[in-house]
Amino acid sequence: MSNGAFFNPEFETLSRSEIDALQLERLQATVRHCYEGSAFYHKRLDGIHVKPSDIRSLEDLRRIPFTTKQDLRDTYPWGIASIPASQCIRLHSSSGTTGNPTVILHSRQDIDQWANAVARCLWMVGCRPEDVFQNMSGYGMFTGGLGFQYGAEKLGMLTVPAAAGNTLRQLKFLTDFGTTVAHAIPSYASRLYEVMEERGIDPRRDLQLRTLVIGAEPHSEDTRRRIEQMLGVKAYNSFGMSEMMGPGVAFECPEQNGLHIWEDYFIVEIVDPVTLEPVPDGEVGELVLTTLNREAMPLLRYRTRDLTRILPGDCPCGRAHKRLDRMKGRSDDMIILKGVNIFPIQIETILMHFDELASDYLITLETLEDNDSMTVQVELKEMFIDDFTKLQALEKEITRQLRDEILITPRVRLVPKGTLPKSEGKAVRVQDLRKQY
């Protein structure tokens, strides 16, 4: 299967025209499978008078309506599936804290294809069977744990399913097992380094770690570079979502110039999140994905709500699969303050430019005297800065740069290291305490 730089050379080395031909063939099969197996899609396609035989080109995909997260909730628990639940071997779901969770079913074939996709990603960045892979991600309903577990095993690595949290145990495993590859969310990677510093562990001297996979949280390029510098690794950006399968949807190659989305698995569209019309390559919009080789629960034109763009041009790695820019945030995570649209990653990008600051920050939105305001708390890298004048000057400069970026003036509060609450799951970056009128 593997051949040098490619885990699946048959698909990774396809030309653009070969990718297009394969996508059309698989799209036609997928639409037919959805129409014949899913009551939801059968009704939806009949409602717009489209039959599977009407899909004659990739452009015909645009005749099909979008699928949304609300559709998954409305058909809970598995009304959107294209095969009976009795033919499936696993499900994953969201937390469902605001209503029905979204449930995704997997057949045995789906699990095998998922593992293959993740193995392909890991192989692409230099992972080999002789590596030791430590997975510092939650298992269970969250797809990040099992997705990377099965992919690492498919590749042939010795796996350490450490799961999330318990940082002292993570460090012991990293040291004792000679871990060379790890997977963690960006905020936890920063937390890991803080504990290393406290314990006197030098990652370059005391660990064999060389490759880190990061994802699940939107993060800036500056955050990635800071993680690389702290841990002495190459950190590769990963994108996945449970509705598609989980991790393995798109991944950086060693060039680190965008995430290759596996187009033998997915058709990618970028649309304006308001008009839902396609935008040109290079322009930011909402990512829309259509699955091409899923059996249990294929999805047609699924609105991910993630904001990104297709990077124009060819990649020096030789793969013709399109590249996505890092996620800019989510269209439903956008902050609207005083009529201005703001994404948390804009604030993070500014904060990471200051060497005096650590990685943890918290954006608080609240209503003060009937006016909405923003406060940005950010931890200092050192416990304290004794020079009050220097501290004031730093706050003032951060405020100025944030105002230039987001067009409003936040209150900036520099707090001692360790002040902000820590989470072993996804970091909480925004709390909205505004009054609702």
Image: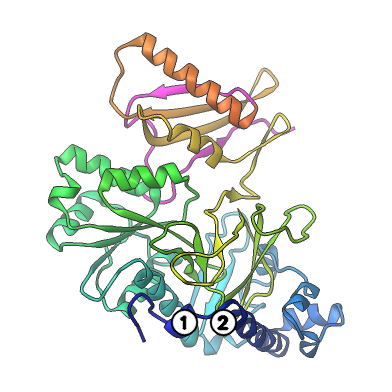
Three-letter amino acid code of the residue under disc 2: Arg
Residue sitting at x 50%, y 28%: 376
Secondary structure under badge 1? helix
Left or right: residue 134 compared with residue 278 = left
Residue sitting at x 39%, y 53%: 185
Left or right: residue 289 compared with residue 360 = right
State yes or no: residue 414 in magenta.
Answer: yes
When the figure is inspected, residue 434 is found, relative to residue 173, above or below; the finding is above
Residue to which mark 2 is pinned: 294
Local packing at callout 2 (Cα closer than 10 Å; few below 14, some 14-19, many 20+) is many
Answer whether residue 411 is visible to the viewer in this image: no
- Asked if disc 2 and disc 1 are in contact, CB closer than 8 Å, the reply is yes
**Looking at the picture, how far across and down is residue 236, in whole percent?**
39, 58
Residue sitting at x 83%, y 83%: 50
Q: Which residues are magenta?
A: 408-437
Of the two numbered discs 2 and 1 on the same chain, state the one appearing first in sequence. 1
**Looking at the picture, how far across and down is residue 282, in whole percent?**
64, 55
When the figure is inspected, residue 245 is found, relative to residue 207, above or below; the finding is below
- Out of 167 and 383, give the one closest to the viewer: 383
Rendered image quadrant of residue 157: bottom left
- Out of 16 and 424, give the one closest to the viewer: 16
